[in-house]
């Protein structure tokens, strides 16, 4: 969490969950987020009988203030008001200034806040705070539990299906794709074993792209497929290198002979064999590195869409 957001949290005596700072201020449940893209302010309100008129009034306030506070975008709904600002220190300070003046104006309009249930609109003494897609709402306890159950079961049925076999084919496809840089570059005269990174990246990427499920099978086949394409690729590399060496001895040999001789050399000449095994191992280590690299990029911060915060 950014320092400025942390400071604002202390200033207001708010709490935080999942990088959302929230709390009740002047009977309004407010949540604030601040990331590298935008800073956002969300105020939980309940507009009912006079919803259209109230919405219009709130929109007017935001419109009048938009320029002064550099508001990027705002949305007024019957259950809450989102106001989005640029990311950055100046923008965040404007968000803070706007927050204090806006809450006053909402109070002046007599808008219903935290002590009214966002779901049924009834007044409630003790409310639960419910996170719905990163926006916090106040609900009475019965509505909160009901919403959690119904909305989460909807999320569950929408969750995409994952399969092992398509993932398997995807991993194979990815492995073949990932070894191409190695094969293309291996005629060059420089260190190319690092190209193994692409093998790891693409094999795992292929598995996930074809909706492969997260299971033990994945942990096994991704490295196996990586190794399965690395061995022939390093072999091709040796064919080139040895044929260069042999043709340097001034007799030309056909490609089929090169392959056969390379194969025999690896089997019989211990120096070549050791070097071959080391090269395969090093490329494989790079492939594993590629797998980890991919892991680090993909962080799962998203859990339940709807849950009770407190
Ligand atoms: Zn309710």
Image (spheres, grey):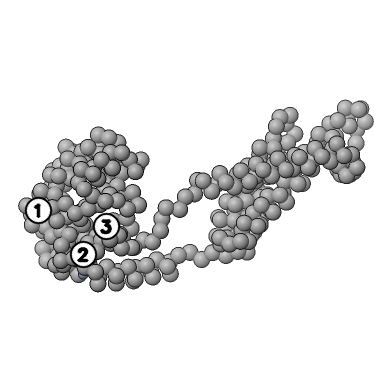
- Give neighbour class at mark 1: few <14, some 14-19, many 20+ (Cα, 10 Å): some
**Mark 2 or 1 closer to N-term?**
1
Q: Nearer the viewer, mark 3 or mark 2?
A: 2
- Give neighbour class at mark 3: few <14, some 14-19, many 20+ (Cα, 10 Å): many
**Mark 3 or 2 closer to N-term?**
2
Q: What residue is drawn where x is 64% and y is 54%?
A: 222
**Mark 1 or 3 closer to N-term?**
1
**Mark 1–mark 3 CB contact (< 8 Å):** no
Position of 305 compared to 172: left or right?
left
Q: What residue is drawn where x is 14% and y is 47%?
A: 102
Q: In which of the image's four quarters is ligand 1 placed?
A: bottom left
Mark 1 — residue?
107
- Give neighbour class at mark 2: few <14, some 14-19, many 20+ (Cα, 10 Å): many
What mark, if any, has residue 136 been given in the picture?
3
Q: Nearer the viewer, mark 2 or mark 1?
A: 2
What mark, if any, has residue 127 been given in the picture?
2
Q: What residue is drawn where x is 57% and y is 58%?
A: 210
Position of 264 compared to 52: left or right?
right
């Amino acid at each position: 969490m950014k320092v400025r957001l942390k400071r604002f949290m202390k200033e207001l005596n708010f709490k935080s969950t999942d990088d959302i700072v929230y709390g009740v201020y002047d009977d309004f449940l407010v949540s604030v987020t601040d990331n590298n893209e935008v800073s956002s302010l969300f105020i939980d309100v309940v507009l009912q009988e006079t919803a259209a008129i109230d919405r219009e009034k709130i929109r007017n306030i935001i419109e009048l203030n938009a320029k002064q506070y550099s508001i990027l975008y705002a949305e007024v709904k019957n259950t809450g008001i989102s106001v989005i600002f640029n990311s950055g220190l100046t923008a965040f300070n404007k968000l803070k200034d706007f927050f204090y003046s806006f809450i006053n104006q909402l109070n002046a309009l007599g808008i219903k806040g935290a002590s009214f249930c966002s779901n049924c609109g009834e007044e409630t003494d003790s409310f639960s705070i419910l996170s719905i897609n990163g926006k916090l709402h106040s609900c009475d306890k019965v509505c909160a539990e009901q919403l959690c159950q119904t909305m989460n079961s909807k999320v569950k049925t929408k969750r995409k299906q994952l399969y092992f076999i398509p993932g398997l084919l995807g991993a194979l496809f990815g492995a073949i794709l990932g070894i191409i840089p190695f094969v293309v570059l291996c005629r060059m005269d420089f260190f190319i074993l690092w190209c193994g990174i692409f093998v790891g990246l693409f094999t795992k990427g292929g598995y996930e792209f074809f909706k492969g499920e997260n299971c033990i099978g994945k942990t096994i086949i991704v490295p196996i497929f990586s190794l399965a394409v690395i061995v022939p690729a390093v072999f091709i590399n040796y064919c080139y290198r040895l044929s260069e060496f042999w043709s340097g001895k001034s007799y030309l040999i056909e490609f089929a002979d090169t392959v056969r001789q390379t194969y025999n050399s690896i089997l019989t000449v211990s120096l070549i064999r050791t070097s071959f095994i080391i090269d395969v191992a090093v490329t494989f280590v790079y492939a594993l590195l590629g797998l980890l690299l991919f892991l680090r990029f993909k962080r799962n911060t998203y859990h339940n869409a709807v849950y009770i915060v407190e």
